[in-house]
Image (spheres, rainbow, N blue to C red):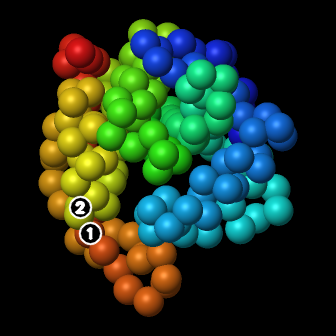
Amino acid sequence: MTAGPQLRGSYVVLTPVTAEHVPDLRRILRTPEVWRRWADEAASAGWPFDDPSATRFAVLLDGLVRGMVQYAEEDEPAYRHGSIDIFLDPAVHGRGVGRDAVGTLASYLVKDRQHHRLVIDPAADNEPAIRCYAAVGFRPVGIMRRYERDADGTGWHDGLLMDLLADEIM
């Protein structure tokens, strides 16, 4: 995992994940609302430092860990783009925290990392997440059928591919 800079939004501070953030992040992942979408993301003992392709930030609100946002990059010149994933403590859902975190990271990826296109891929039935991403400027591209395993591992669900072009950043 690569470390990134500290990023400031209107409400949130995105800071590179450190060992001190891990207990709070694991607690948030165990909440039913988050586990339903992220399942056993933290199953590895080395999580969240176990994926060298991801740059992960703790989402801080008023100094408290309220979630994690991460990005990955496709560096092949013909396909270069960034992707974003996020989870937040249900205690802050519906308060604009996700919109601020995603918007702050999207601005960084366009302005500082020079991406012309960003993607995000919520579950197709995750209406609150889709509304959040749309508020940042992401647009639906299409449904990815049976895209991801259900949290309980027994089935598959569809994903919605959304993208945001650099000149569409709000």
State the residue at coordinates (83%, 40%).
19
Q: Amino acid at mark 2?
A: Ala
State the residue at coordinates (67%, 48%).
25
Label 2 crowd bin: few (<14), some (14–19), many (20+), radius 10 Å: some
Closer-to-camera residue (100/85): 100
Furthest residue toward bottom? 154
Which label is found at residue 5? Answer: none
Question: Left or right of 89: which side holds 168?
Answer: left
Task: Tell me if label 1 and label 2 are in contact, CB under 8 Å.
Answer: yes
Quadrant of the drawing holding the C terminus: top left
State the residue at coordinates (57%, 38%).
66
Mark with earlier residue (1, 2): 2
Compared with residue 88, is residue 77 higher up or lower down, i.e. above or below? above
Name the secondary structure under disc 2: loop
Q: Is residue 55 visible?
A: no
Q: Position of residue 29 (x, y in %)?
A: 60, 58
Q: Position of residue 7 (x, y in %)?
A: 57, 15
State the residue at coordinates (23%, 63%).
125
Compared with residue 11, is residue 124 higher up or lower down, i.e. above or below? below
Question: Left or right of 128: which side holds 21?
Answer: right
Disc 1/disc 2 C-alpha distance (Å): 5 Å
Q: Position of residue 81 (x, y in %)?
A: 40, 32
Closer-to-camera residue (128/147): 128
Which label is found at residue 158? Answer: 1
**Tag 2 residue:** 124
**Which of the 4 quarters of the picture holds residue 41?**
bottom right
Name the secondary structure under disc 1: strand
Q: Amino acid at mark 1?
A: Asp
Question: Left or right of 55: which side holds 97?
Answer: left
